Image (cartoon, rainbow, N blue to C red):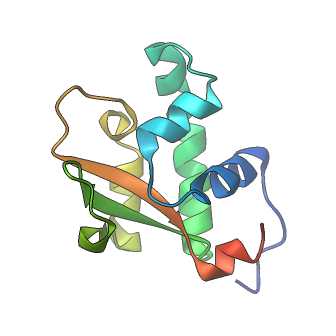
Amino acid sequence: MTDFVGFTHVEHFVLEEADADNVPLWELAATLTHDGTQDERIAAVPRLADALMSLARHGLVEVRTLPASPPDPNEAVLIPLDRLAEVVRDVDNWLWRDELTSLIVVVVTDAGGAWL
């Protein structure tokens, strides 16, 4: 974290929103676009993915897979950094689906919490 200087607008948004713990990606996209259309949410994915990658590289957030029903934070599995780009750049992971078997969620780390 020694090379971390400041936040972009979207990084700050993600960090603040993820402070609620286990925030689904689809919820971040919906909130950033003010419950915009699916096209607006899709358009926001590259910015959100870049922000998540940056925050995760600096150890400020973790991205995990969480069983959707019932959601049990104790069963969350960390997505390693070497796979993270693939996961967060997949638009489908950012969109609400009627049938969810798992959720991709964001969690603020202790280091990230110090920035709030």
What percent of the width, then of the height, locates residue 107? 50, 65
Which residue is at a point 67% across and 73% down the rendered structure image? 112
Horizontally, residue 58 falls left or right of residue 45, namely right
Question: Quarter of the image containing the C terminus?
Answer: bottom right
Horizontally, residue 84 falls left or right of residue 10, namely left
Which residue is at a point 83% across and 65% down the rendered structure image? 6
In-front residue for pair 36/6: 36
Residue sitting at the far bottom: 2
Quarter of the rendering containing residue 28: top right
Which residue is at a point 23% across and 48% down the rendered structure image? 68
What percent of the width, then of the height, locates residue 65? 29, 60
Horizontally, residue 17 falls left or right of residue 80, namely right
In-front residue for pair 107/1: 107
What percent of the width, then of the height, locates residue 8? 78, 51
Residue 66 vs 82, above or below: the answer is above
What percent of the width, then of the height, locates residue 91? 37, 34
Question: Quarter of the image containing the N terminus?
Answer: bottom right
Residue 8 vs 44, above or below: the answer is below
Which residue is at a point 56% across and 16% down the rendered structure image? 36
Residue 32 vs 71, above or below: the answer is above
Residue 17 vs 1, above or below: the answer is above
Disc tally is 0
Residue sitting at the far right: 5
Quarter of the rendering containing residue 78: bottom left
Horizontally, residue 41 falls left or right of residue 92, namely right
In-front residue for pair 58/111: 111
